[in-house]
Image (spheres, rainbow, N blue to C red):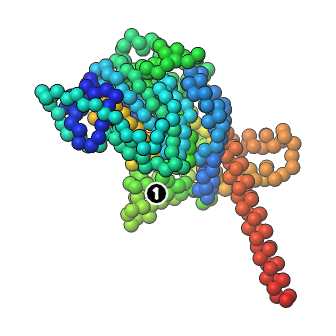
Amino acid sequence: MKTKSLFRHIGLFTGILLPASLSAFEVHEWGTFTVLVSSRGQTVNWYQPYSDSAKLPAFVMMNNAMVMKSNIKAARVRMETPVIYFYPEEETTVSVRVAFANGNITERFPTTNDGPYGSMGTQPSFILNIEPSMTCVAVGPTRESIFNQRMREFSVNTAPTVARWTGKLLPPDHANAKLIPAVDAQQGENYAAARNVPDAWIFQSDAPGNSFIPATQQVEKFIFYRGAGQSLPPYCVSMPDDHSVTFTNQSQSASTFQVALRVRDGQATWVQIPNISSPATKSAPSATITFPEKTISLDQADRELRALFLGELTTRGLTQAEAQAMIDTWNHTWFAESGQRVFTIVDRTWVDSNLPLGITPEPKKLERVFVARFEVLSPADEKKLGAIMTKQASNTQTVTKIADLELGRFSNGAAEIVAENMKQTLLNHFNEIAAQEQTTAGARK
């Protein structure tokens, strides 16, 4: 475990001395960015169905009066279920702020303390009460100072709302653990998986309660939030044909973990994509793989991918329990939903830049491990959907045919992609005819 902070609610800048005893405080975070792309790699604004949000516990949904409106809003990227775990050494008070560039925080629990960030130029306040007898060590920029710098850098167009929590960190076996709101087995089972981290300390928010969850129950094993926006992870995915996937790395560092998975008719096939250099190197920053013809059962795919992801997530800094909790939260959609997708671990530099996180007191160690999921339509998917959209049929027949494509929650976004491509094809055709007509008319003169 870690140490008690002597600094509470303090904004810190480069060069300030901190007590050496603070060095033990650790914070770990994991989350997922989900993007829908066409076979040619086009991204699209897509809607998260209400049924997805309905799977969350009621106390999460009701914390934000705008959650219904936010969830039906189209976005290019869904930031799904980031959770933040705390590991201090003794009970302490903590303040956390997070913002999503060009996006919004849509859901959260416990309740946040205030509304959107008030000013792009706001400077953090700081108070120093250092006793001469303390042993101090010099530190670099703090999470709090970096967070404020990022907020100043955001333009008016990309200015996000900011979620802020303040509260106490209590030991895992603290009596207040009994105040953590119960999760209904029929609603929020996947949410509850994130609680299976025995060493994580309890966060008890000091925010006021609401008509659904009183202040005394604003307690959780972590801080949970979700968001939607336009800032895309720095990668591109496409399908040049129905059996191949191309992954392109546009991040600032080499991409060393990416997996392509296809699920169809209750069977799966997957392959790990080789390491890919960053665009700054002379090597080609992309790779194309072909899905193996041999398929395996979903159970076998789940076992194999669980083991692979568990090893990678722990290598990246999560504890064994945290990595297992992340997989338990998502494996039912990551490894079982029909379709084809590519997973990669997001470049930490991009995460810190587009999802700045401010924490007071300053943790000695902060791990942030985010998985990007690119859901990609195959050329065959697009062709079949296009045929359904242009052919006259009854509502019942159309619904049946769309269901046969097994696009699930991505159906609306897939239709947007196909409609846009059809529109572009028609416009190109019209322009060609118009150009030919103009040429012919000129020749007649």
Identify the residue at image location x=36%, y=14%.
173
Q: Is residue 355 left or right of residue 52?
A: left
Q: Position of residue 56 (x, y in %)?
A: 58, 26
The tally of labels here is 1
Q: Residues within 10 Å of mark 1 (few under 14, many from 20)?
A: many
Image coords of residue 78 (percent x, y): 56, 41
Residue 320, placed above or below residue 121: above
Q: Nearer the viewer, residue 191 or 167?
A: 167
Q: Is residue 433 left or right of residue 156?
A: right
Q: Which residue is mark 1?
A: 250
Q: Residue at x 34, y 34 (%)?
A: 125
Does any portion of residue 238 appear in the rendered image?
yes
Dot 1 amino acid type: Gln
Image quarter (top left, top right, bottom left or bottom right) of the N terminus: top left
Q: In the figure, residue 325 lies in which quadrant? A: top left
Residue furthest left as drawn: 133
* Image height of 227 relative to 385, above or below: above
Q: Secondary structure at mark 1?
A: loop
Specify the quadrant that holds the C terminus: bottom right
- Asked whether 290 or 158 is in front, the reply is 158
Q: Where does residue 193 sit, x and y in percent of width and height?
A: 49, 25
